[in-house]
Image (cartoon, grey):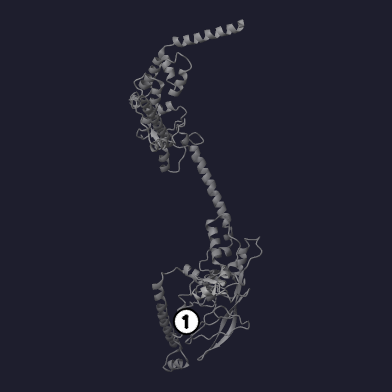
Amino acid sequence: MAPAQQQQQGNKAINDTNGCLLLEVLPTEIHVHILTFLRAYDLSVVQLTCKYFHNNNLTETIVKHFAEHVYPQELTNGYDTPMVHPDSETKMSYQHLRNMEMLVVARVLSRPEPVSGFYVSKSWCRTALKWLELQQEELLRAQQHATANNSKKKKKLSKKQQRIRNRRLSDAHPPWPNVNSELLCPHSNLKEENNSKSARARRKLLDKQAWKVLKKLYPDSTALASGNGECIQCALERQTDRKMELDQLEAEKAERRLPLNCPIVRRIYTRSRGVPAHCVKPTGYSTSTPPVIAGVAQRPTCPLIPGLYHALPRSWLHQWRRYLKHGGEKPPCAPDATALLCPAHRLPLIPPHLESYLYGETSNLLSTTVATTAVSSAVAAPMTPATPTSAGITNAAGRPVGTMASIATSPNTPTMDRSMVESLRAAGMSPADVASQRMAMMTLERQNSNNAMQTPQQESQPALSNNEQLDRENGVVVEIITEEEYEALSKWWPKIHSSFVARFAVLEEATTATDISLDCSSLSSSITWSTSPCRECDASSRSQCCDLHVRNRARSKMGGLSAKKKSSGTKKRAHNVPAKLEY
């Protein structure tokens, strides 16, 4: 060996001897005070670094100093009992200190919550208690295993008991160093919660003494005093974000409701009856009480003034109004009446409620025909049928398209012929008295008819709302808008150039109707559609309830049956008759 290497080894031995001498020179109290800043795990590592710290007397002194001076005595009582440490008869070790620390943590977390103090995460508390329970379970299991090895008889656990023991506390893991990591905001302050219930579910209060003990065991923890409150910076940021979100919603709402700045479009938006009120004739009477001139009831006419109109599905208008009011992911499509086209001929179908309104059978577009059937039957008797136009187009009810048609006459409707009118006038009654008498007879007959129709219907099925009844009677419910309103509405979809429109025109023609008793002249309305309506398909909701024809794929096999089977009484379906399912 070289002289230089021998000199280096000699210097190292001298330094080690001097280091040990320096540690031995220091009093034991200084060593104890210094080492009590460490935890049991760190002290066990220090014990392996030098033979001076590998001293049972020093270890016992450190453990007792922890129990008497570092931690409160009410938290460390019983740390050396067999219940806490099975090997309590042996000398003190850092295992005793580790058991003491677990006992202190369990007792600190089990204390009742004070009025004020420091916040601790409840999730961390549950994890720590579960981990301490697992550690205690392992100590007891090790003691039982050692006792079983010393004894002659070894008690074996069943498979079920072993499985239960393995599953128990299987999700337990050591608690994280910072007890309040879940309660911290990005600014290292107390996180803001949505409400007090959520805050109580996440936070636990500890008094000042308990927090000091917990802080010593977990020095990386952040102190969150209850008096400081939640993070002010987070609250300001949340208010700013909320204000920006509200401003964005208001901007989107203003942009969405931009079409309402136009008074014409706003008139469509606020409409509830489905008909432009400014285009209704100011007749001063309803359809249920038609005018009477000299005792003769006049035929009802179209309630709309002459002009161009459009029929739009009510479903599209409802979706458009809902989008303007509440918004949505995407705006509705352009105004389109494709839903009115029949699938067979691709021609428009006129809904029954629209046809009844245009021909004066109902006074309200969005009303059902149940309540007006008796009225129409009572009014139709004295009317003179209108002469069809040269076009000769009739609707599904046999009504001419070009002119207004009369309503079918009911056999129970009271009529006034010429002899009755002359007899009433001969009795001295004025024309006004004759008209009032006729209206009284019609009102009485109408009430009797309504009672006869509504009573069995109410007994057989529950009452339906007006919208439900409309959906039952019509395949598509529509609303009427004017040509000007349709153009103003279509401007908000400039990229759409082609869509089906149900356009019709209301015209007035002067006609003369001569009564038996007197002559009078009036105006009759004619309705012309831009596209000829389909008169073969049904526009009501009954068209959706059709029969299903199912093709029989096994009919070729059925045709090969022997005559013996056919004569045995088994009935087979003919080849040319498809299977039919009705519902």
Q: Residue pushed farthest top?
A: 3
Q: Which of the pair 6/401 is nearer the observer? A: 6
Q: In this view, does 384 lie above or below 252?
A: below
Left or right of 569: which side holds 111? Answer: left
Residue under label 1, please give it: 377
Q: Can you tell which quarter of the image residue 28 is in? A: top left
Instruction: Locate residue 363, reporting x and y percent.
Output: 50, 75
Residue 215 versus residue 403: which sits nearer the camera? 215
Give neighbour class at mark 1: few <14, some 14-19, many 20+ (Cα, 10 Å). Answer: some
Residue at 38 percent of width and 17 percent of height: 61
Q: Quick check: can you spot residue 215?
A: yes
Residue 168 vs 426, above or below: the answer is above
Q: Position of residue 466 (x, y in %)?
A: 46, 69
- Please, what secondary structure does the residue beneath circle 1 have? helix
Residue 144 in the image: x percent, y percent? 36, 28
In percent of width and height, residue 421 lies at: 45, 91
Residue at x-position 46% and y-position 39%? 192
Is residue 481 visible to the viewer in this orientation of the structure?
Answer: no
Against 126, residue 392 (above or below) is below
